[in-house]
Image (cartoon, grey):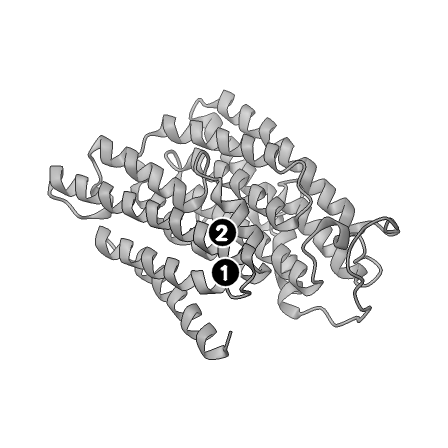
Amino acid sequence: MTPQAKLIFTSSLILGTTITISSNHWITAWAGLEINTLAILPLIAKSHHPRAIEAATKYFLTQATASALLLFSAMMNAWYTGQWDITQLTHPTACLILTSALAMKLGLAPFHFWFPEVLQGSPLTTALLLSTLMKFPPMTLLFMTSPSLNPTLLTYMAILSTALGGWMGLNQTQIRKILAFSSISHLGWMAIIVSYHPKLTLLNFYLYSLITTTVFLTLNTIKTSKLSTLMTTWTKTPALSTMLLLTLLSLAGLPPFTGFLPKWLIIQELTKQSMAPAATMISLLSLLSLFFYLRLAYCATITLPPHTTNHMKQWHASKPTPSAIAILTTTSTMLLPISPLILTTV
């Protein structure tokens, strides 16, 4: 792909995201989502591999369906209430259809099946965009419509997401699929709290995006996409592998890392809302995803790779770690001590 084409598609992505997150009218929000979808498709399919073409097709079909549902929900609400304002969503059927549309856009269970397949067929940089930037506009719409949505439905969907994200990621060997199931599991934590404390959902999304960006950029630097090649990286880049270990533990939500902060605050808020059983269940289900984070961390720091792995041998060329990864890793692991400062913004 030429640099000019990349520039056009990246600019369109930023434009589409900006239009959606700054709009008050359903039509402009929908237009922004459509620009986003059309801009990311060439980036998914740029390798011309059959798996990439398949991923782009699956992504287009699911996003087109979700956009149609979102538009239908907005039109139904406008038909009954005369309002096109995003915050004025009051009709119960329109709210239900919108929940389904946003769940499909985000990859929230039970509409999550497309996400691992699309991520697996995309390059690592495009997979990073799909996991972070592409989820920002629908997450903003979820934030804006959160008072109108059904909390019970969102709680059930959140618990299902956390369960499926952890359970289906257990036997994966492809790192992009593991990170896709990790994303589904994290979306469960965001969805369960959005009706009660929407700002916590956004905080969780920001921190998740930060940590996931660090993981993807590290994997892109060491050119790794499967567990078998991850096992051989320690001898080439020990410092980067150690940083990857700490970032993965932060993504798992273990203290004393940054990823623990949103989980702690969400459990605290759920307990305040007399939802201790839901908080207990989602905490126990997140132990499933902890297993594959630990497996990834173990593979990243293993010192003697097994001789039976079938992977392509790579040149041992030690390059300096990009400064962006160093800064991102520091923020991904060490923000917990300044949590009082972060809490003033929530």
Residue closest to the eye, 193 or 181: 181
Q: Which residue is mark 1?
A: 44
Q: How many marks?
A: 2
Residue closest to the eye, 217 or 195: 217
What residue is shown at x 22% (from left), y 54% (from top)?
27
**SS under mark 2:** helix
Query: Seen in the image, is 319 located left or right of residue 217?
Result: right
Residue 29 place in picture, x, y as percent: 28, 54
The image quarter containing residue 185 is: top right
Q: CA distance from mark 1 to mark 2?
A: 23 Å
Which mark, by number, is residue 314? none
Residue 60 place in picture, x, y as percent: 40, 53
What residue is shown at x 76% (from left), y 56% (from top)?
241
Residue closest to the eye, 17 or 47: 47
- Amino acid type, mark 1: Ile
Tell me if residue 275 comes above or below residue 73 in the rendering: above
Q: Please identify the residue farthest to the front as the structure is shown.
A: 50
Disc 1 residue crowd, few under 14, some 14–19, many 20+, Cα 10 Å = many
| Circles 1, 2 touching at the beta carbon (< 8 Å) | no
Sequence order check, earlier mark of 1 and 2: 1
Q: Is residue 27 in view? A: yes
What residue is shown at x 74% (from left), y 60% (from top)?
240
Q: Which residue is mark 2?
A: 206
